[in-house]
Image (spheres, rainbow, N blue to C red):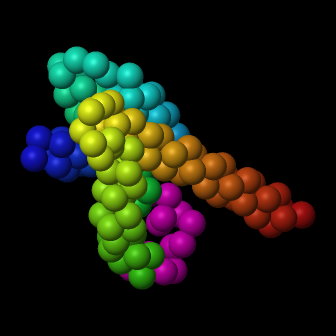
């Protein structure tokens, strides 16, 4: 519950940062923080460290969520409603992520380190998101260069 509240609260401030600094910069920064925090979660062996890691991960997710909508308004200005609906479905994240995270858990319960290793899923998602942002950035630069010519 604390993670959900943290994500929602930081989404508001993430939107303000994205409006001021731009969606791409805010997304890259927050995704980089998320990546570092997921690594922190994987190596966390103390509960306080894990709680701090989860809260910072939630903050990164909230800020990224807000920044994505800033990017969306720039990349798809004529289809913002449909694109936003697609983003808000969240069927992939809520449906696929938990079972993949659970696959790291030792089913015999002899070793509980799999719980923390499940956060590698978020590392992979952050890396994929950074790659997608890079592709958007290259596409924006190419379209700007083409329109000037």
- The question of residue 46 being in magenta is answered with no
Residue 96 visible, this orientation: yes
Q: Position of residue 122 (x, y in %)?
A: 42, 45
| Count of labels in the image | 0
Q: Quadrant of residue 57?
A: top left
Between 148 and 84, the one nearer to me in the picture = 84
Q: Position of residue 16 (x, y in %)?
A: 32, 45
Residue 133 visible, this orientation: no
In the picture as drawn, the residue positioned furthest to the right comes out as 149
In this picture, residue 147 sits left or right of residue 62: right
- The question of residue 76 being in magenta is answered with yes
Between 127 and 96, the one nearer to me in the picture = 96
Q: Position of residue 38 (x, y in %)?
A: 40, 33
Q: Position of residue 65 (x, y in %)?
A: 36, 53
Specify the quadrant that holds the C terminus.
bottom right
In this picture, residue 32 sits left or right of residue 117: right
Residue at image x 31%, y 56%? 98
Above or below, 108 against 95 in this view is above
Residue at image x 54%, y 72%? 76
Residue at image x 54%, y 51%? 129
Tell me the magenta residue range: 70-81
Report the magenta stretch's main SS: helix
Between 80 and 20, the one nearer to me in the picture = 80
Q: Quadrant of residue 41?
A: top left
In this picture, residue 112 sits left or right of residue 86: left
Residue at image x 76%, y 64%? 143
């Amino acid at each position: 519950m604390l993670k959900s509240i943290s994500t929602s609260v930081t989404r508001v401030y993430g939107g303000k940062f994205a409006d001021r600094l731009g969606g791409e910069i805010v997304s890259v920064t927050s995704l980089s923080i998320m990546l570092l925090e997921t690594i922190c979660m994987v190596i966390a062996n103390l509960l306080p460290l894990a709680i701090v890691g989860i809260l910072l991960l939630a903050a990164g997710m909230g800020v990224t969520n807000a920044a994505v909508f800033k990017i969306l308004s720039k990349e798809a200005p004529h289809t913002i409603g449909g694109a936003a609906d697609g983003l808000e479905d969240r069927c992939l994240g809520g449906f696929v992520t938990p079972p993949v995270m659970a696959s790291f858990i030792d089913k015999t319960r002899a070793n509980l380190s799999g719980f923390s290793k499940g956060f590698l899923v978020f590392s992979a998602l952050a890396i994929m998101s950074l790659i997608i942002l890079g592709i958007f950035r290259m596409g924006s630069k190419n379209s700007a260069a083409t329109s000037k010519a």
